[in-house]
Amino acid sequence: MSDNVIHSPCVRECCLDNRDVCLGCGRHIDEITGWNEAANDEKLAILERARQRLGRNGSE
């Protein structure tokens, strides 16, 4: 079992667009509210979806 903690990508620039996606971190409202209960594999999937929504390639 892994004890690695995957931290929230929240950047404290919370503002939802018309699709309920945060303009700061790229997560959907359901992903934000469910973050603490999500398993690490789901958190990694959330991070990838958020990165794609924000148009980031992960190299920054």
Image: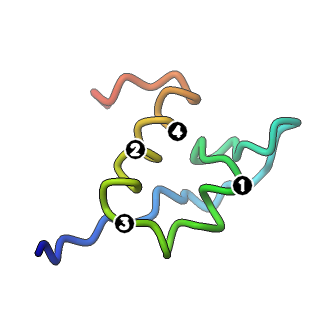
Please state if 8 lies on the left or on the right of 32 as rendered: left
Task: Identify which amino acid the numbered label 3 is placed on.
Answer: Ala
| CB within 8 Å, label 1 to label 3 | no
Residue at numbered disc 4:
50
> What amino acid type should be assigned to the residue bearing mark 4?
Ala
Q: Earlier in the sequence, mark 1 or mark 4?
A: 1
Mark-to-mark CA distance, 2 and 4: 9 Å
Q: Which residue is identified by label 3? A: 39
- For the residues labelled 3 and 4, the Cα–Cα distance comes to 16 Å
Q: Alpha-carbon distance for marks 3 and 2?
A: 10 Å
Residue 46 as seen in the image, left or right of residue 34: left
Mark 1 in CB contact with mark 4 (< 8 angstroms): no
Q: Which of the two labelled residues, at mark 3 and mark 2, occupies the earlier sequence position?
A: 3
Q: Is residue 20 above or below residue 54?
A: below
| Residue type for callout 1 | Ile
CA neighbours of label 1 inside 10 A, class few (<14), some (14 to 19), many (20+): some
Measured as percent of width and height from the top left, residue 14 is found at 72, 56
Mark 2 highlights which residue? 45
46 lies left or right of 4: right
Q: Residues within 10 Å of mark 4 (few under 14, many from 20)?
A: many
Amino acid bearing label 2? Ala
Q: Which quadrant is home to the N terminus?
A: bottom left
Q: Farthest residue toward the right?
A: 18
Task: Return the residue at label 1.
Answer: 29
Label 1, label 3: how many angstroms apart (C-alpha)?
17 Å
- Residue 34 image offset from top left, x and y in percent: 59, 67
At x 47%, y 56%, the residue is: 9
Q: Residue at x 47, y 34 (%)?
A: 51
Q: Residue at x 52, y 66 (%)?
A: 35
